[in-house]
Image (cartoon, rainbow, N blue to C red):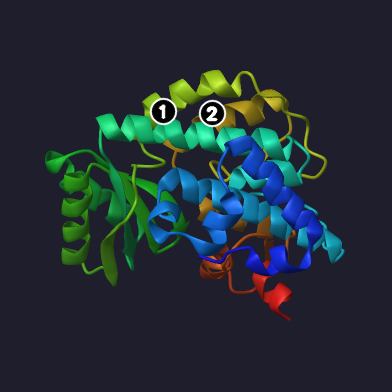
């Protein structure tokens, strides 16, 4: 709790942003973000909305400090924020999309429950094998490749549990289940992608004003149709963060700035390439 509070306290534009968000969603996202209760903020859809708004508040703060991006990308939910930063869509339209996508995923997960897990210290091929070895317990797949030896898995609770057990048996430094309400970035979310595509079809995307990279294939997106397809399908597709960071570095990016709460992505970039400079907006705001 408390994410975004420092910006709220000092910037009237951020207060206006949260007021706008509350008007769109019908819930007081400022109160939930700053005060909880933790049970409400812990719900997947509420947390996603709160993070999305906080991301935009940090982007606004960065712009106010003269920090403007030369290229943008986003990890999972953060891709919506990257689209706003690149001028591909309006903040309000993105907020509605986050809500609809989250609710769609929860509806699918209620009918076909799923969760996620993390494996630290094994390579991709080893984690793939752990998932294959666990498949008789229930579907489980690699969902997020964050770094060479930091991989997330998604699937049924039984499948994830068995894969975690297998990974630990293979010598993982750490493997454990995550407290997630759905099997994000896995085939279990295919139905959610299909359903969400009908909403995405009503959205209006613009060509990006700065280069926009997809975290699904480390490729640049320029055409509105390709952006729409990425938005519609990302919930069920594997996230290739390691490849994305490596591509950006190869293309000349030397400084990564994380616009959002915390510093998880800052650490993840460092796991991939320690030669680059990484900065979280929260650290700059606290200075």
Name which residue lies at 51% across and 31% down: 100
Name which residue lies at 33% across and 59% down: 118
Packing grade of label 1 (10 A; few <14, some 14-19, many >=20) is many
Packing grade of label 2 (10 A; few <14, some 14-19, many >=20) is many
Q: For marks 1 and 2, give the CA distance.
A: 9 Å
User: Compared to 202, does 177 lie above or below?
Assistant: below
Q: Which mark is residue 5?
A: none
223 and 204: which one is in front?
204
Location of residue 280 (image quadrant): bottom right
Which residue is disc 1 drawn over? Answer: 192
40 and 170: which one is in front?
40
Q: Quadrant of the C terminus?
A: bottom right
Name which residue lies at 64% across and 74% down: 275
Which of disc 2 and disc 1 is earlier in sequence?
A: 1
Location of residue 167 (image quadrant): bottom left
Residue 128: % across, % down: 29, 49
């Amino acid at each position: 709790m408390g994410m975004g509070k420092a910006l709220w306290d000092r910037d009237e534009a951020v207060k206006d942003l949260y007021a706008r968000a509350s008007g769109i969603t019908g819930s007081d996202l400022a109160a939930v973000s700053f005060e909880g209760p933790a049970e409400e903020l812990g719900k997947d859809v509420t947390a996603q909305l709160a993070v999305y708004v906080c991301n935009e508040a940090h982007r606004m703060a960065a712009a106010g400090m003269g920090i403007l991006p030369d290229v943008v990308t986003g990890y999972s939910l953060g891709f919506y924020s990257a689209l706003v930063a690149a001028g591909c869509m309006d903040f309000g339209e993105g907020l509605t999309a986050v809500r609809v996508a989250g609710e769609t995923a929860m509806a699918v997960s209620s009918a076909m429950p799923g969760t996620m897990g993390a494996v630290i210290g094994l390579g991709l091929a080893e984690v793939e094998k752990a998932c294959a070895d666990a498949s008789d317990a229930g579907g489980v797949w690699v969902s997020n490749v964050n770094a060479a030896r930091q991989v997330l898995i998604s699937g049924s609770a039984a499948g994830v549990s068995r894969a975690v057990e297998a990974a630990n048996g293979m010598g993982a430094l750490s493997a454990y289940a995550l407290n997630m309400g759905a099997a994000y970035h896995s085939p279990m979310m295919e139905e959610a992608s299909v359903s969400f595509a009908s909403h995405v079809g009503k959205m209006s995307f613009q060509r990006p004003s700065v280069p926009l990279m997809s975290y699904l294939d480390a490729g640049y997106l320029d055409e509105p149709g390709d952006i729409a397809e990425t938005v519609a399908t990302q919930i069920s597709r594997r996230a290739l963060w390691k490849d994305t960071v490596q591509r950006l570095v190869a293309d000349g990016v030397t400084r990564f700035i994380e616009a959002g709460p915390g510093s998880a992505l800052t650490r993840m970039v460092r796991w991939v390439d320690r030669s680059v400079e990484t900065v979280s907006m929260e650290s700059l705001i606290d200075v």
